[in-house]
């Protein structure tokens, strides 16, 4: 472990004013989810950030200025810090709200465009994300490149006025509803595999894009295979520098991995269990419950630390990998806890829903085994 | 890390490098004023923050130095004054004990360093009292914990009890003890981890360093991740204890999470550090057992890991989801 890895943080000072602002944001989200819940407009469920798609809900959030909260005011963003976004996302996940429509764009596409996009591209795309008009899917994984992103083969060839893309992307969540895709493609195949990658933004309405559904083991359709056949991308849709895609995407991954959705996917189930234990009442599971709560509290702290690092301008790649590894483990252990307590397991019960979603937790956004290897690499650096 | 914390870390590294016997540095720790960190100078302490004290506790443990710093600093906090000279007090938690009478008769087992402490601070559910161990009404039978460090049986028979009217309350003292214990656990886990990391990177088997075996490297990463996790929990709990305005539930939740996370890391690190070391790790000569046996002793010291889990679970079940969520906010 490096010397810096275990420093005692001087307590992440938050000014009283900032605390008030964070509390107000929390309240705002609670009021919205509370009123929707009371009106029966959604049912809280595990894995909501991937499975609960409701454009209307996303637009309500947008109307309250809760999407793109960290982005510059110039583009319609909130101009606030990563902690503010953490407060919002935590509360949404806690409520099991239908947030899948805007989740990916708000989490990592906006930040990627802000870091690497031209001003023109920022002006064109960010306001659409902020208003939940633009829905993004993530074209990273391929049939032959899952956790090994550098093995990407989808090729972008230079043509008059831009690029022509051909290839296949897979496990592309919400592609069937997306207006835009983020695309990682190979613009040069002559060098090493980490070189010659570039990032693009693609209009999903461009001719040559075909989306085919992949139904998951629970019978739901959220991910897809997307085929690109000679798809034209205008020159100005290149994100950042040609050939610099690997470095750019690695930064993006810390946004993808370092958030509370890697911890709270089964929180609605934990709420079910807690209510059951309270109403029964049943004290036989206090030890297990206490152990889980201790982990949850610390995982939330780590989310907070990562948000702080982002606010300080760092891309906390290893911390995010570590959070995701432990957070996914927690999400699965909540399901096992519900099982030990004895919650019902019919196909439509919360326990079964969470269980059927669970194999994906430790795969999406980087398989746990791969995350461990990232951590080892950093730990054993001489 | 603050500049002061870095200096403290270096100071303790130097202490460890010069120490002939890792169990005899307490005198130097006292002389250097390390035990008084976190206590204001006007109360006989050395100044510095609670976070600085946690650095000292952690670094002493990480360097493999055995001292009663957890007991000494916690009892100073309880009585709201640094111990004078070379003396220090130790501590026992007895939630259900009735200490209302002036003369106390009670038996305590496994009281750390009681054979060399001058006094015993007893913390019950609602009171903090002290007893002089040199008094005739107190007998101390020496013993050793799993790690071979002093712990004793203390028998009080009509011992005269001093109630503390000022100073922090019982709940705060218990939380402060758990906080310091977590820092000691974390430092010990970190020490075991560092030894293991060095070993698997140097030791060659099948023609390459052990760390080239994927199962070994992934186990090593897990040790790092869980140790760092315990550090996050400790940082959060330190902040909660430092700020007097922290609501009791939040402080209790943060401290319990730190104590439980440290104990969970201890179990994992003790087991896997031995596994990765192979047979050399279980010899008396090699230093690993000094760490692992301490991890086993400390994870259930004062009140066991499971007692902490049960109390936290019961509290959460009692309070409900909203309070749970609020109390575990970062």
Image (cartoon, coloured by chain):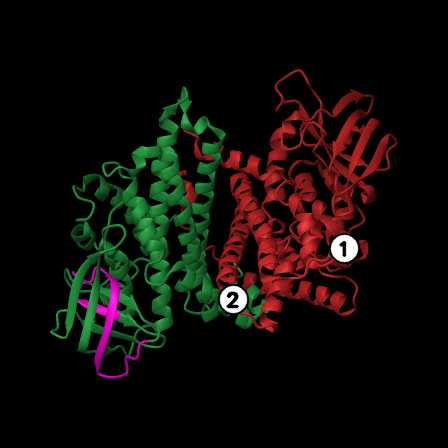
Residue B103 x/y as whole percent: 20, 81
Residue pictured at 75% horizontal, 32% vertical = A169
Residue A202 visible in the displayed image: yes
Is residue A365 shown left or right of residue A302?
A: right
Q: Nearer the viewer, mark 2 or mark 1?
A: 2
Magenta highlight range: B97-121
- Residue B115 falls within the magenta-colored stretch: yes
Whole-percent x and y of residue A177?
82, 45
Q: Identify which residue, A229 or B262, lies in the foreground.
A: B262
A78 in magenta: no
Residue A10: in sight, yes or no?
A: no
Residue A281 in the image: state x and y as whole percent. Answer: 57, 73
Residue B328: which numbered mark, if any? none
Disc 1: which residue: A58
The chain displayed green equals: B
Residues at badges 2 and 1 in contact (C-beta under 8 Å)?
no
Q: Give the image quarter of residue B278.
A: top left
Q: Chain of mark 2?
A: A
Residue at 63% over, 17% down: A191
Chain that appears red: A
The subunit carrying tag 1 is A
Residue B66 higher or lower than A350, as above or below: above
Q: CA distance from mark 2 to mark 1?
A: 40 Å
Residue at 22% over, 77% down:
B105
A73, B149: nearer the viewer:
B149
* Residue B225 rendering spot, x and y as whole percentages: 47, 43
Residue drawn at (79%, 69%) of the image: A39
Mark number, residue A284: 2
């Amino acid at each position: 472990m490096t010397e810096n890895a275990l420093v005692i943080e001087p307590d992440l000072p938050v000014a009283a004013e900032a605390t008030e602002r964070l509390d107000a944001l929390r309240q705002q989200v609670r009021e919205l989810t509370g009123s929707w819940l009371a009106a029966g407009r959604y049912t809280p469920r595990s894995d909501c950030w991937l499975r609960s798609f409701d454009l209307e809900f996303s637009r309500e959030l947008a109307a309250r200025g809760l999407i793109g909260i960290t982005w510059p005011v110039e583009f319609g963003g909130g101009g606030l810090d990563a902690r503010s976004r953490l407060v919002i996302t935590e509360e949404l996940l806690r409520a099991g709200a239908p947030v899948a429509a805007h989740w990916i764009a708000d989490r990592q596409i906006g930040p990627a465009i802000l870091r690497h996009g031209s001003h023109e591209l920022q002006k064109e795309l960010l306001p659409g994300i902020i208003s939940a008009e633009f829905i993004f899917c993530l074209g990273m994984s391929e049939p032959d490149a899952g956790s090994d992103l550098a093995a990407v083969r989808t090729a972008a060839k230079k043509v008059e006025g831009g690029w022509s893309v051909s290839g296949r992307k897979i496990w592309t969540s919400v592609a069937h509803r997306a207006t835009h895709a983020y695309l990682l493609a190979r613009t040069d195949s002559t060098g090493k595999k980490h070189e010659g990658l570039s990032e693009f933004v693609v209009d999903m309405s461009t001719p040559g894009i075909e989306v085919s559904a992949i139904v998951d083991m629970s019978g739901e359709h959220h991910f897809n295979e997307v085929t690109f056949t000679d798809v034209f991308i205008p020159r100005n849709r290149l994100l950042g520098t040609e050939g610099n895609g690997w470095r750019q995407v690695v930064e993006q991954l810390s946004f993808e991995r370092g958030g509370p959705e890697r911890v709270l996917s089964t929180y609605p189930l934990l709420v079910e269990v807690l209510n059951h234990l309270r109403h029964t009442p049943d004290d036989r599971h206090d030890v297990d419950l206490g152990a889980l709560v201790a982990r949850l509290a610390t995982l939330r702290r780590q989310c907070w630390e990562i948000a702080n690092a982002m606010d300080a301008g760092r891309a906390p790649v290893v911390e995010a990998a570590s959070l995701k590894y432990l957070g996914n483990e927690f999400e699965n252990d909540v399901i096992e806890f519900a099982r030990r307590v004895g919650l019902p397991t019919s196909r439509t019960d919360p326990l079964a829903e969470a269980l059927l979603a669970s194999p994906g937790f430790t795969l999406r956004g980087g398989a746990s085994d791969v995350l461990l290897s990232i951590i080892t690499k950093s730990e054993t650096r001489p | 890390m603050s500049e002061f914390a870095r200096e403290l870390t270096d100071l303790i590294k130097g202490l460890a490098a010069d120490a002939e016997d890792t169990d005899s540095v307490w005198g130097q720790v006292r002389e250097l004023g390390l035990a008084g960190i976190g206590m204001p100078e006007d109360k006989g302490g050395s100044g510095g923050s609670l976070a600085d004290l946690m650095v000292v506790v952690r670094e002493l443990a990480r360097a493999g130095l055995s001292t009663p710093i957890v007991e000494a600093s916690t009892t100073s906090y309880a009585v709201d004054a640094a111990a004078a000279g070379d003396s220090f007090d130790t501590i026992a938690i007895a939630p259900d004990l009735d200490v209302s009478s002036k003369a106390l008769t009670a038996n305590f087992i496994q009281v750390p360093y009681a054979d060399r402490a001058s006094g015993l601070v007893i913390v019950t559910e609602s009171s903090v009292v002290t007893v002089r161990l040199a008094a005739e009404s107190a007998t101390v039978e020496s013993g050793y914990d799993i790690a071979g460090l002093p712990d004793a049986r203390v028998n009080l028979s009509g011992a005269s009890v001093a109630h503390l009217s000022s100073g922090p309350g019982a709940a705060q003292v218990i939380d402060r003890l758990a906080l310091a214990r977590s820092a000691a656990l974390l430092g010990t886990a970190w020490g075991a981890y560092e030894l293991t990391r060095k070993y698997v990177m140097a030791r060659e088997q099948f023609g390459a360093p052990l760390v080239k075996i994927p199962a070994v490297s992934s186990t090593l990463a897990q040790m790092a991740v869980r140790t760092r996790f315990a550090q996050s929990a400790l940082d959060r709990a330190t902040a909660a204890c430092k700020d007097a305005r922290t609501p009791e539930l939040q402080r209790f939740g943060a401290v319990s999470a730190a104590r439980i996370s440290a104990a969970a890391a201890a179990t994992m690190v003790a087991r896997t550090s031995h596994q990765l070391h192979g047979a050399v790790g279980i010899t008396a000569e090699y230093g690993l057992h000094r760490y692992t046996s301490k991890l086993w002793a400390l994870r259930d010291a004062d009140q066991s890991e499971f007692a902490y889990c049960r109390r936290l679970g019961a509290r959460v079940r009692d309070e409900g989801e909203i309070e749970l969520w609020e109390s575990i906010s970062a």
